[in-house]
Amino acid sequence: NAWSKPPVNYNTNAIIRVNAHAWLLDCGLLCPLALNSMNVSLADIDGVFVSHLHGDHVLGLEELFFTNFFGHQRRIRLYLPNGLLSRYSGIEGSDIWENCLRGAMESTAFDGHREHQLMLEDYADVEVFEPHRPYEIFGLRCEIFPVIHVRHRPSYGMILDGRVAYTSDCTFSRERIDSLLNRGVETIFHEVTFAPPWPGTVHTSFQELADLPRDIAERIILMHYGDDTPETSFRAAEDLGFRIARRGIVYDFS
């Protein structure tokens, strides 16, 4: 989760390999370290989708963009929900450049003999996604959907190829789970905390998921848990049919 520390875990980010391309679902603070542990170079990453503006999902972009722009003279693709750019959403304080990256990344470059102040579009080819509309990422059909995480701050999940859903961080919603399954999603990567639920929580407690029928639980892979989660909690979840996402594990949906 946000407080994970290697070698136990890294942040909850994922690398997608499709059609000879590699791209990221989120790029948090520890994502460059995680990729390095898997012998994946930042220069091998062709794109990144950002679900929301918390550090464990976005702060690795600084190293990713700097490495590719200055080290390899290339831009990568940045897939952004429209809610993360205030000029599209009008949501104050929810702009990935102005409210998250600019202070660290507004560097200077030289175009010939002219000084040039770098902006987000210098580092990345930005493509803006709207919820519930089909898009393609390197030939893979994708669709984003809004979730509730921190209220009044946009956060989004993604459906891949109509078969796999990734919730990112979210509070519990049985309606969302049923909606994904009813439209044909076969596997849901769902965030979870094994801590007891408390008022104002912005995550899904396992106690909320534990009441799901077994045939639904068997289609859910749990992620985003804390480093201190005991193995007894994992075993209890597996006894109910859930699977546990582990550090560095590879899932093949071909």
Image (cartoon, rainbow, N blue to C red):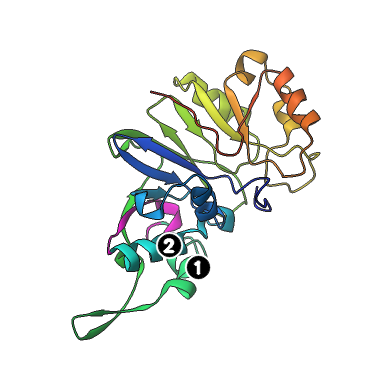
Q: Is 219 colored magenta in this rendering?
A: no
Q: Give residue 86's mark.
A: 2
Mark in the foreground, 1 or 2: 1
Marks 1 and 2, the one that precedes in the sequence? 2
Secondary structure of residue under mark 1:
helix
- Which one is in front, 64 or 54? 64
Within 10 Å of the Cα at label 1, are there few (<14), some (14-19), or many (20+) other Cα atoms? Answer: some
Where 225 sits versus 176, above or below?
below
Residue 93 percent across, percent down from the top left: 52, 65
Image x and y of residue 73, in percent: 27, 64
- Residue at 65 percent across and 47 percent down: it is 1
Magenta residues, start to end: 73-88
Q: Which residue type does callout 2 highlight?
A: Ser
Horizontal side of 47 relative to 206 (left or right) equals left
User: Pointers 1 and 2 in contact (CB under 8 A)?
Assistant: yes
- Provide the residue designation for mark 1: 99
Q: In this view, does 138 lie above or below 150?
A: above
Crowd around label 2: few <14 · some 14–19 · many ≥20 (10 Å): some
What residue lies at 39% left-to-right and 77% top-to-bottom? 107
Q: Which residue lies furthest to the front in this view?
A: 39
